[in-house]
Image (tube, helix red, strand yellow):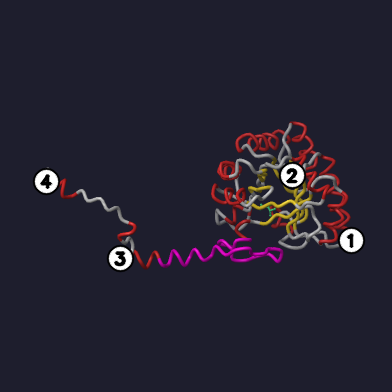
């Protein structure tokens, strides 16, 4: 498993960090087998796995349930777990309790939260011993306010983002996710920080990249953002399901190949 020190070293020597989301045992297992450096149990699970419209309905119990499965599938990969909306930014006491619950119950390596307004909380959680990943730019929990659009695209917004990113590092964040911002801005921020900066829709000059598993493998997702590259096509699973359906109905499945050969009924009948 990559340690935080190794992730920082990767940044320093210019080795790119790979990160992908995973939400269950098999996807986590695949990510680990593919030697991905970091797994994010993102609250994007609301859309990809639970069928919600956005991340807004995701609960802390959902996150714990899925993150535990991910940890079982990827025991040797650095796992980050999202704090869902409504579990942070309430009060110091509740925020810290939620962070602690996620950290302790999932055995994750770090917790992630969205937004620069959480600087004080990140500082306190870090002091308590919980490693935190910050998330700036497009923060999906706030799309009701911001919409799904490029962030940091005016001079003022870009300067604010640079300042916010610095604040995250000063607050103790161990890494920063930057989503949907101009690539030249992401390059500048990555250059200014000593912690690894992982981009999604932030161009090639961040220290690493993160993509959502279901987006990159075309698995049940109907609309894709501009920054998503599809590396495989899991939608072909539907062909298998269609053929199975037809074969069950026609009696072609199961054939002899998928049937136990042992015969028992003559013995049963002899005992009668
Ligand atoms: O929840 C998620 O998948 C994320 C990524 C988009 C970075 O936060």
Q: Earlier in the sequence, mark 4 or mark 1?
A: 1
Disc 3 marks which residue?
251
Q: Disc 3 and disc 2: Cα gap in Å?
A: 53 Å
Check if mark 3's residue and mark 2's residue have beta carbons within 8 Å: no
Q: What is the x, y in percent for residue 29? A: 57, 48
Numbered circle sitting on residue 155 = 1
Query: Which quadrant would the C terminus be assigned to in this image?
Result: top left
Mark 1 CB within 8 Å of ligand 1? no
Mark 2 CB within 8 Å of ligand 1? no
Mark 4: secondary structure: helix
Q: Disc 4 and disc 2: Cα gap in Å?
A: 70 Å
Query: Which quadrant would the N terminus be assigned to in this image?
Result: top right
Q: What is the x, y in percent for residue 236? A: 51, 66
Q: What is the x, y in percent for residue 24? A: 56, 48
* Residue density around tag 2, few if under 14, some if 14–19, many if 20 or more, within 10 Å: many
- Which dot, 3 or 1, sits closer to the camera? 3
Disc 2 marks which residue?
133
Numbered circle sitting on residue 270 = 4
Numbered circle sitting on residue 87 = none
- Which dot, 4 or 2, sits closer to the camera? 4
**Left or right placement of residue 242 versus residue 178 in this view:** left
- Which dot, 4 or 1, sits closer to the camera? 4
Q: Earlier in the sequence, mark 3 or mark 2?
A: 2
């Amino acid at each position: 498993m990559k340690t935080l020190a190794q992730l920082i070293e990767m940044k320093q020597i210019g080795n790119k960090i790979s990160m992908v989301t995973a939400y269950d045992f098999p996807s986590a297992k695949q990510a680990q087998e593919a030697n991905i450096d970091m797994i994010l149990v993102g609250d994007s699970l609301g859309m990809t796995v639970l069928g919600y419209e956005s991340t807004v309905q995701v609960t802390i119990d959902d996150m714990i349930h899925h993150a535990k499965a991910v940890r079982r599938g990827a025991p040797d990969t650095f796992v980050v777990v999202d704090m869902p909306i409504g579990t942070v930014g309430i009060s110091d006491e509740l925020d810290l309790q939620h962070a602690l619950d996620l950290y302790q119950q999932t055995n994750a390596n770090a917790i992630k939260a969205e937004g620069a307004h959480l600087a004080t909380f990140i500082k306190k959680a870090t002091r308590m011993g919980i490693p935190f990943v910050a998330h700036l730019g497009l923060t999906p929990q706030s799309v009701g306010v911001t919409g799904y659009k490029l962030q940091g695209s005016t001079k003022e917004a870009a300067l604010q983002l640079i300042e916010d990113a610095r604040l995250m590092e000063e607050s103790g964040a161990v890494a920063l996710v930057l989503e949907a911002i101009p690539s030249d801005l992401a390059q500048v921020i990555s250059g200014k920080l000593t912690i690894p900066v992982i981009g999604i829709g932030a161009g090639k000059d961040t220290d690493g990249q993160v993509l959502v598993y279901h987006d990159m493998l075309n698995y049940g997702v109907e609309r894709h953002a501009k920054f998503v590259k599809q590396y495989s096509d899991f939608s072909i699973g539907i062909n298998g399901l269609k053929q199975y359906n037809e074969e069950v109905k026609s009696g072609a499945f199961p054939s002899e190949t998928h049937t136990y050969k042992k015969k028992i009924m003559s013995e049963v009948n002899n005992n009668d």
